[in-house]
Image (cartoon, rainbow, N blue to C red):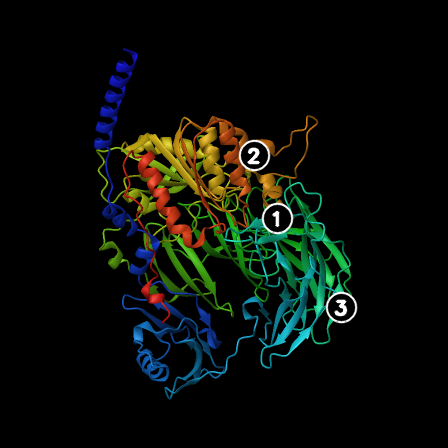
Amino acid sequence: MFKYVSGLVAATLFSIAGATAQERPVLTDQDYARAERFMGYNTQALVDGSPGQPHWLPGDRFWYRVLTAKGSEFVLVDPVRKTRTAAFDHARLAAALSKASGKTYEASRLPVRDLAFSPDEKSVSFTAAGKSWQYNLGSGQLSPGDAQPGPNAQNEVESPNGRLAAYIKDYNLWVRDTKTNQATQLTTDGARDYGYATDNAGWTHSDQPVLRWSPDSRKIATFRQDQRAVGDMYLVTTNVGHPTLKTWKYPLAGDKDIALIERVIIEVNSPKVVRLQVAPDPHRGSLSDDISSSGTFDDVDWSPDASQLAFVSTSRDHKQEKLRVADAATGAVRDVFAETVATQYESGQHAINWRYLPKTREVIWYSERDNWGHLYLYDAGSGTLKHQITKGNFVVTQLLRVDEAKCQLYFLADGREPGNPYFTQLYRIGLDGQNLTLLTPEAGNHQVALAPSGRYFLDTYSQPDKPGATVLRGADGKLVLPVEKTDISRLTATGWKAPVPITVKAQDGQTDLYGLMFTPTTLDPAKKYPIINYIYPGPQGGGVGSWSFSAARGDNQALAELGFVVVVIEGSCNPLRSKSYHDACYGNMAENTLSDQVTGMRQLAQKYPYIDLERAGIWGHSGGGYATAAAMFRYPDFFKVGISESGNHENRNYEDDWAERYIGLLKTNPDGTTNYDNQANAIFAKNLKGKLMLAHGLMDDNVPSSNTMLVVEALTKANKSYDLVVFPNAAHGYGVYSPYMTRRRWDYFVQNLAGAQPPHDYEMKPVPDPRNVMQ
């Protein structure tokens, strides 16, 4: 009897399961292909009229490359004549290059990306078809060029006059004559883990030197980096046969020994090392968790005559900054002043904003002491404050130019104008703090490129949902010449639509939060859609990224096309607002802006009834991976599905600088616990209720995979089900496996959040913009 009843129940359950499976919506390859059309590699190729970077020539002229519906063209702008013309005869060059190379080229599809005008501007040199060429603009004659890159060109730093290139060899610094390739050794006592200009912040490392040339190309400011006592990080390849062990210095938060830099100035012509008479500094920078995050040696500023070097020393916990000035000939160092903060100091956004002005013996300094990022003027002799230059409830992000002759500053700032506080504008102000002037009047996010002379600037502006334009303005902000207008007609013809800018209140019920919402282009307001939160909590950056127009932002719109509402909300703890806003998570990075995300999503669901808050998902990469797992563990009744990629789940297992900057130095309490314990995701893994996928590259040299494996271990011990994707030989971003991860992400949300059946093993196929293909 028992066996009979059991069999009957089993048959009934099988019947119900079969019916459920039959009712389950099924997505096809065609559905995924339609969604894939909204990926950046498909949408960006349909945007025309966005210029590339300007390349300035004498007389404030400049050239740039712009993408068009047919391909691309090179444009030359003359501000004095107010003209915009072709930089050269494209058809003529295409014919000459076709003849010389044996390949056929079209005028609109030249395989040229960069040009170099000769000093007399009668010819241009470039690389194409695997060779170097020189093209005479007058005669149309094309001849082989003589440009011969150095054997280590990709790891060199060229001098301002272009005659020398510095590089590292055997832990010592060398220079190469760019004309003759003759090499000269500048230092001789460099050794492994104690070399000159070596680039290693733990989470990022390369063979490029970290240094700053003097304006006269005769001196180099750099350091000797002492990593000898620093702990090692290990990664192991996956392959047939014996694996390869990758080892490098990678200090962790709380380590007794971290990398130190011994500052030096190197005289180049007759090699001599001048050691600065100051104790070694921690490997720290005022801008971010590296000393070359701006692309060069950060926090150093040469005097115009190269007789002095101003620099800033940052404490290990980023709470104290010391401005110092060194005598370049003797190495003597004078302390000018210091600033100490309660949490963490930063010198701006995307650029370091302090400047040394030796002519007037003054220093422009950046500080958030009044709760906003502003500029201050100091006496470089006495170290006393003269006055505050900029004031108000807005953030100075980048100091672009100091016009010492006119005592004026040009800077970018966010939040001063009404509307979205993340929109960047250009301003001018007197060094005395008077006559603040807005130079970019159009609403939107402005990207500015100043002419070297300071007489003009190129202004590209747009909004996330509105394509913009590029114009040339004079230093006074007046329009000189329209340059380009972004054309998205080919894009909109495909059915594309822009994201919706959103505003919600933070957890405090008072602070406005800003973000973007992506909905299906076939949205039916009468239906219910699961909601997915894409998160990147910073605190060094946010999930939206640039607030300028973009044809795609990751896979947000593509994912929405599969039947979801996708939201990105810039919560508190992220930069570009007030100091208190940014510091909301200081010492408690596990907050991850999550309370803001949850309350924001609830408000959106009230405003847009088609959002189904009972089916809420979340995903993120790196810091977003950390936040995603935290969301699943700390808000298990709200978030039902999460995908955590490459997360720094245990900040005691991440590089020292990031954690010690935003959490503080690791401290052990009398009971043996530390201030880092509650930052770890593993200890909360037992709270998981929903579906969680974890992913990591096993050769991740930014966030080591042990971060994810600790969570895996905790979930396993807690008897929790989870899904795991590993990429055996991939780094932090997965590289060639990124499309695979995107597809797995779509499958996971489709199956577990939408309750549908994804197509089997759909293959995503990224394609390059044909206008940028080099042939």
State the SS at label 3: loop
- Circle on res. 233: 1
525 horizontally vs 624: left or right: left
Asked which quadrant contains residue 271, the reply is bottom right
Mark on residue 679? 2
Residue 535 shows in this picture: no
Q: Quadrant of the N terminus?
A: top left
Discs 1/2, front: 1
Which residue is at the front of the view, 124 or 28?
28
Question: In this view of the protein, can residue 404 be seen by the observer?
Answer: yes
Tell me the amino acid under the disc marked 1: Met
Q: Amino acid at mark 3?
A: Ala
From the image, tell me which residue sits under label 3.
329
State which tag comes first along the sequence, 3 or 1.
1
Residue 419 in the image: above or below residue 679: below
Please say if the residues under marks 3 and 1 sit with CB atoms less than 8 Å apart.
no
Residue 750, horizontal then vertical, whole percent:
31, 38
Name the image quarter holding the C terminus. Answer: bottom left
* Foreground of the two, 513 or 522: 522
